[in-house]
Amino acid sequence: GILFDLLISFAISSKVYNDSTFVISGWSIVRDLSNIFFIFILLAAAFRTMFGSSDVGKTIKNVIVVALLINFSLFMVRVVIDTSNVLAHLFYNRISITGVNNTELPPSIELKNTGTQREISTGITAGLNVQNFLSGKAVEKFLGSNGVKAGTFATIIIFGIIVNLTAAWIFFKVGFMMLGRIIGLWMSMILAPLAFISKLVPGASTHVKAFSFEKWSKDLISYALLAPVFLFFVYLIIL
């Protein structure tokens, strides 16, 4: 539960993405390599001009547009991430859990401030009312109507184990989905220049799908929307 809560609070923290120096360094390297690629494109356009090609002007125009997009790609990706994190915090801060920490967290929460994250796992458990399946009153009522039998008692124990293991597996899986969101958005930031430059490469979406603009944009939107959509449904459960 604690790991689950920490990963959610980190996944929607803008500082995790904006203050990651290795991401900025990685993006700078990929951007510089992409700018070098422009030189080869312009050289190819020059050779095509020498041989009488008529679409060189269109190529140069596309190169200029993509060059601008590449140099502003980190900013554009940050806008998408920050927008999704602000939306996620709208639901995150509306989740109120009785008897636990309900402090409102801004999107720029510090990583070191690990004591202020909300106990979302507690809220989900309370909202689904899982703990009442094996409460003392429920067990007494069941045994009172069916008699105390070894088989009945074993069934209750097995059912309790299954319920707890299922809940633990769900928290574990969702927690690592949030970790995957962090890593996925980091990679989207770093590889943004390659995604834009792929628009200049004929057939990139078919032959180099891993670095194509279509796949990159789809992954960016998917990772960005993961947190707000999940927290929206959590809010409905706990409401």
Image: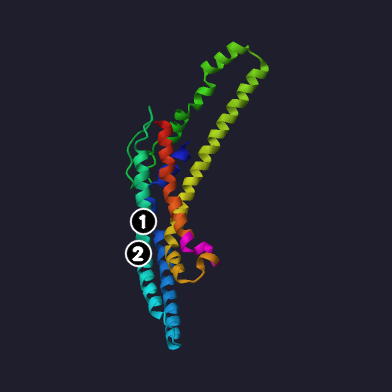
As drawn, which residue projects farthest toward the front? 54
Prevailing secondary structure class for the magenta stretch in the rendered image: helix
Report the side of 83 relative to 122 (left or right).
Answer: left
Asked if 122 appears above or below 25 in the picture, the reply is above
Give the residue at mark 2. 72
**10 over 70 or under it: above or below:** above
For mark 1, what is the residue? Answer: 78
Q: Residues under labels 2 and 1: Cα distance?
A: 10 Å
Front-lying residue, 52 or 190: 52
46 part of magenta stretch: no
Task: Give the residue drawn at x 59%, y 11%.
Answer: 145
Residue 6 position in % (x across, y down): 43, 41
* Amino acid marked by disc 1: Arg
Give whichever of discs 2 and 1 has the lower sequence position: 2
Mark 2 residue type: Phe
Tell me the tag on residue 103: none
Query: Start and end of the magenta stretch?
Result: 207-214
Residue 129 picture location, percent across and down: 48, 26
